Amino acid sequence: MHVVSLLPSATEIVYALGLGDALVGVTFECELPEADRAGTAIVVGGRDTRGMSPGEIDAYVKRQLAAGADLYTLHANALAELDPDLILTQDLCRVCALPSERVSDAVAYLGARADVLSLDPYTLDEVLGTILAVGAAARVPDRAEALVDGLRARLAAVSAAVAGRPRRRVAVVEWVDPPFGAGHWIPDLVRAAGGEPVATHPGARSAPTTWAALRDAAPDVVLVTPCGFHLDGAVEQAATVGPRFPGAEVWAVDADALIVRAGPRLVDGVEAIAAILHPDAVSAPPAGSVRRVA
């Protein structure tokens, strides 16, 4: 089987299912083991936003969307040459990946025989469901069920560790300029970690807000998890957030590894948040995943 992944979270699911050898095409944003990079084609490109500030990135995205332009480019000829059996895509967020309709149109135009599976979870439970869906589509349902069972067992262990403890109020800032209150599955991560999410949008899209609204939610802990950034970028942005929340703990989190990509590592994110909120009950997260800035 040849699999093409058009979003980083799907690539992580493919590897977690032990299907790295079947992966023939990815996006420019997908993270691959060094040994696999040379043999895996890039079929989706986009603008390199490294060096741009959050405000500059936001302005660029708004200009593109207002003009009806895509933020990503599908290299259709490269896709056709790979002759994929399964293409993994999404309709969850136009800012995060190419919409599935663009992929389906390209597949039809090329006369390809690939199945197109759109992964669009809005809750943590739905994320686990997408792992099962990918496993079924890739003909490894037993692997997917075993993986999900293991992830659920880890979530149950966290739940048991934090049971009965006070739930600190947690605001999650998914973008800083302008500020966005986190949505989708992120409030679920906070609850699973033994916290009380505030100023969030459970099961719905992340949405712009104001710093005043975030402060009015009276968080005890603020997690800065900027989409598209690892820990160094999150730390840099969290440093600008800390002064806005006197009296609250402010933490930077490796967003791409732990929070914003809808794959198996969200459970790592739950464990990391639990360690922030309940350090005497949960083991410390791996080095390089979180850092307190205020």
Image (cartoon, grey):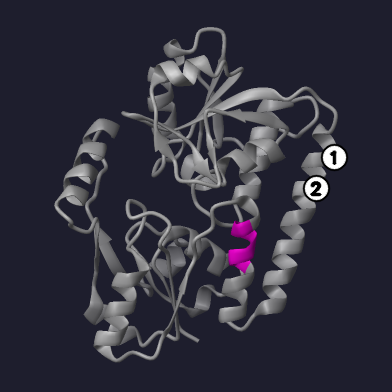
Label pair 2/1, CB-CB below 8 angstroms = yes
Which of the 4 quarters of the picture holds residue 78? bottom left
The answer to whether 231 appears left or right of 108 in the picture is right
Task: Identify the residue position indicated by label 1 in the image.
Answer: 160
Could you give the CA–CA distance between mark 2 and mark 1, rounded to whole angstroms? Answer: 6 Å
Residue 210, position as x, y percentages in the image: 38, 22
Residue at point 44%, 62% (across, down): 34
Asked whether residue 18 appears in the rendered view, the answer is no
Q: Secondary structure at mark 2?
A: helix
Part of the protein shown in magenta = 126-131
Identify the amino acid type marked 2: Ala
Rendered view: 203 above or below 45? above
Q: Nearer the viewer, residue 72 or 196?
A: 196
Residue occupied by mark 2? 156
Viewer can see residue 68: yes
x and y, in percent, of residue 8 in the image: 44, 59
Residue sitting at 56 percent across and 32 percent down?
290
Q: Is residue 118 left or right of residue 271?
A: left
The x and y percentages for residue 188 are: 63, 42
Q: Eyeballing the image, is 165 above or below 247?
A: below
Under circle 1, the secondary element is helix
In the image: residue 276, left or right of residue 13: right
Tell me if mark 2 has few (under 14), some (14-19) or many (20+) residues whose alpha carbon lies within 10 angstroms of its own.
Answer: few
Q: Is residue 129 magenta?
A: yes
Three-letter code for the amino acid on which mark 1 is drawn: Ala
| Towards the viewer: 162 or 143 | 162
Above or below — where is 138 with respect to 97? below
Q: Does the magenta portion include 45?
A: no
